[in-house]
Amino acid sequence: MTVTFVTTNPGKVNEAREYLAEPVEQLDFDTPEIQHADLGAIAAHKARAAYEHTDEPVFVDDAGLFVDAFDGFPGPYSSYVHDTVGVERVWRLTSEEDDRAASFRGVVAYCDGEDFEATPEPVDRDDRRGQDLSADERAAATTDEQVRTDEGDGEAPPVKLFYGVVPGEIVAPRGDGGFGYDPIFEYDDRTFAEMDPDEKNAVSHRGRALAKFADWLAERDTTE
Ligand code: IMP
């Protein structure tokens, strides 16, 4: 079964192909995004809009940088803050804090118009530092859920969510690679902008979420 990744970012599609056994096609479509304090709600809304647009099995992703000292800000507003305040000033703001811990959080949302079987707790891979997460982060990193909301005109199609979290620290900008907040996000003594794409993908929030999605899809294909 082919799954369509609805995203304007071809780099993310290549990353998804590394994880998924199924063929992944890109649909370069800028899915409407709601403002919401919860990444899962944003991703679920995007997945439904993408499914309604394509009428095929689709997935989307949504992510953000969560700074502990600011109760998770910029979080779901990361893109907006990146384009307005900018990375350098997020660093300067955080540099005034004693606690510079932060995490990237991401969610992959899948929708094909069908109901989903309840799934066992997805496995967080040992090589992905799951053991370093706080209890809250671990819960977020290992919980997948099925969301169904009634959005007014009948029941909206269910969406399956897969979360990924990577803990790190905000530092002064270093490195030329990556995008977004990569230069100020340090993991294991290097910023994401100092890692090559494969190294980053192996530990990133998106990689973790994609790995869970891949496990679930593979399991589902064998039980159908
Ligand atoms: P998106 O949902 O992937 O578009 O991410 C929203 C915003 O979060 C982006 O505009 C980036 O600023 C930031 N972001 C998400 N993932 C990453 C990442 O892997 N590295 C750096 N910034 C990221």
Image (cartoon, rainbow, N blue to C red):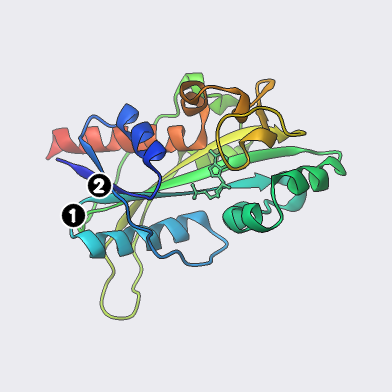
* Whether residue 150 is situated above or below residue 202 in the rendered picture: below
Q: Find out if the beta carbon at label 2 lies less than 8 Å from the nearest ligand 1 atom.
A: no
Taking 130 as reference, is 93 left or right? right
Q: Position of residue 196 (x, y in %)?
A: 52, 22
Find disc 1 in the rendering and name its residue: 56
**Which image quadrant shows ligand 1?**
top right
Taking 198 as reference, is 152 left or right? left
Find disc 2 in the rendering and name its residue: 4
The reply to whether callout 1 and callout 2 are in contact (CB within 8 Å) is: yes
Rendering quarter of residue 77:
bottom right
Q: Position of residue 218 (x, y in %)?
A: 23, 32
* SS class, disc 2: strand
* Whether residue 6 is situated above or below residue 150 in the rendered picture: above
Taking 9 as reference, is 176 left or right? right
Furthest residue to the front? Answer: 176
Q: Position of residue 114 (x, y in %)?
A: 19, 56
Residue at the image position 50 percent from the left and 21 percent from the top: 199
Q: Find out if the beta carbon at label 1 lies less than 8 Å from the nearest ligand 1 atom.
A: no
Exactly how many numbered labels are in the figure?
A: 2
